[in-house]
């Protein structure tokens, strides 16, 4: 997970839904103008991106870690305010569970890993294979993935990543490839981000929404030392795993779950996670300190020891374990060491406000369809 710090006030004041029907995006948003939204089609052809991620390459991909972390011992934060009234879009495709009541947290099928290669590099070199976390989120055409902007855009090369795919409910067990991608693989068609991240590298806007093509289920077989595949169209992402709701301009102090695939090490070198399976944290968010280094001023975070690899995973508000759904109110952006002991103890997300809503709204109304 990529991590850095900003001060974010998440106004999660009681979720009085502004949008009452799935796929409908309503509510006031007065911050970002259309010119602030950067939307660009993926450079890599979709079939090429899916075919690139053979079973051996997936295993060798590393957590995307650009040292986005902060040490903030002794620094205080001040509360931020929403830029308009709160709004929300309800989730879709609730997953049924057998247990009505359980102390266990049922993991959301919507969450998975994204894989990509660094742009303007040799994609055959394993050093350029990366992954983050992400979630399916509700949209008109059920084709939308939410993640961190640093998981779609390379600020050093000033371009979007190549070979970008999303695998919901990814599980890196020792069984066949099908176990790793139970709902198929979804290639990026269009990246949607805020101009302030793309141009100014402002991590107050470290969020992105990616329109993906209909999914492909792949059967891999090694013949003569080379991978060969057969594929099957499995339809829209949201029809297969559902989509989390979306909410913005809410109270900065809220109880949230965060999900992701952490794998990186702590600053002291300890590596408690493998990235092979989904993990979760639960806590109450609060405004985080400002960080001039990353131009961070509006982040909210809570106690969690996630490391690199969990970047892009969702902050879910009002998450219900029975249905495995909630409301996306943030994405894992920055890991914090708040007591200076070389161990990450907080994660933070940009505060979701009217700017975030406008990027989401633009993406939520884009059609994709089958891979070309």
Image (cartoon, helix red, strand yellow):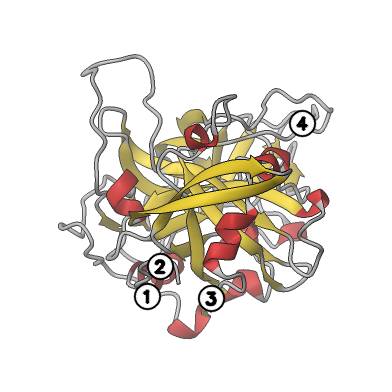
- Label 3 or label 1, whichever lies nearer to me, is 3
Q: Is residue 286 left or right of residue 234?
A: right
Q: Mark 1–mark 2 contact, CB under 8 Å?
A: yes
* CA distance separating discs 4 and 1: 39 Å
User: Alpha-carbon neighbours of circle 1 within 10 Å: few (<14), some, or many (≥20)?
Assistant: some
Residue 296 seen in the figure: yes
Residue 62 in the image, given as x and y percentages of width and height: 73, 43
Residue extending farthest to the front is 224
Q: Is residue 286 left or right of residue 107?
A: right
Helix, strand or loop for disc 4: loop
Residue 170 in the image, given as x and y percentages of width and height: 51, 37
Which label is found at residue 41? 3
Helix, strand or loop for disc 1: loop
Residue occupied by mark 4: 266
Decide which of tag 2 and tag 4 comes sooner along the chain: 4
* CA distance separating discs 3 and 4: 35 Å
Residue occupied by mark 2: 354
């Amino acid at each position: 997970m990529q991590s850095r710090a900003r001060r974010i006030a998440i106004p999660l004041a009681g979720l009085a839904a502004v949008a009452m029907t799935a796929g409908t995006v309503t509510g006031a948003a007065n911050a970002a103008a259309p010119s602030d939204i950067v939307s660009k089609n993926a450079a890599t052809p979709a079939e090429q991106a899916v075919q690139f991620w053979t079973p051996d390459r997936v295993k060798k991909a590393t957590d995307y870690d650009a040292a986005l972390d902060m040490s903030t011992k002794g620094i205080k934060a001040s509360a931020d305010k929403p830029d308009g009234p709160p709004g929300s879009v309800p989730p879709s495709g609730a997953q049924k569970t057998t247990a009505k009541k359980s102390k266990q947290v049922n993991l959301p099928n919507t969450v998975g890993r994204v894989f990509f290669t660094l742009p303007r590099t040799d994609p055959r070199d394993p050093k350029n294979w990366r992954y983050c976390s992400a979630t399916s989120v509700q949209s008109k055409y059920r084709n939308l993935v939410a993640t961190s902007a640093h998981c779609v855009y390379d600020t050093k090369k000033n371009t979007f990543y190549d070979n970008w795919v999303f695998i919901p409910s990814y599980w890196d067990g020792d069984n066949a490839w099908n176990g790793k991608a139970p709902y198929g693989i979804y290639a990026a068609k269009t990246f949607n981000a805020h101009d302030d991240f793309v141009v100014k590298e402002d991590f107050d806007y470290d969020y992105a929404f990616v329109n993906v093509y209909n999914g492909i289920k792949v059967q891999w077989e090694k013949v003569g030392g080379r991978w060969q595949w057969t594929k099957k169209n499995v339809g829209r992402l949201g029809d297969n795993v559902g989509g989390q709701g979306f909410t913005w301009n809410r109270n900065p102090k809220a109880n949230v779950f965060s999900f992701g695939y952490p794998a990186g090490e702590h600053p002291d070198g300890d590596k408690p996670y493998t990235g092979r399976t989904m993990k979760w944290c639960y806590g109450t968010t609060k405004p985080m300190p400002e960080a001039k280094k990353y131009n961070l001023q509006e982040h909210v975070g809570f106690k969690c020891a996630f490391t690199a690899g969990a970047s892009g995973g969702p902050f879910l508000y009002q998450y219900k374990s029975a249905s495995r759904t909630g409301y996306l109110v943030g994405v894992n952006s920055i890991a914090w060491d708040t007591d200076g002991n070389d161990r990450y103890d907080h994660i933070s997300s940009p505060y979701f406000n009217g700017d975030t809503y406008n990027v989401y709204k633009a993406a939520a109304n884009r059609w994709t369809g089958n891979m070309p």
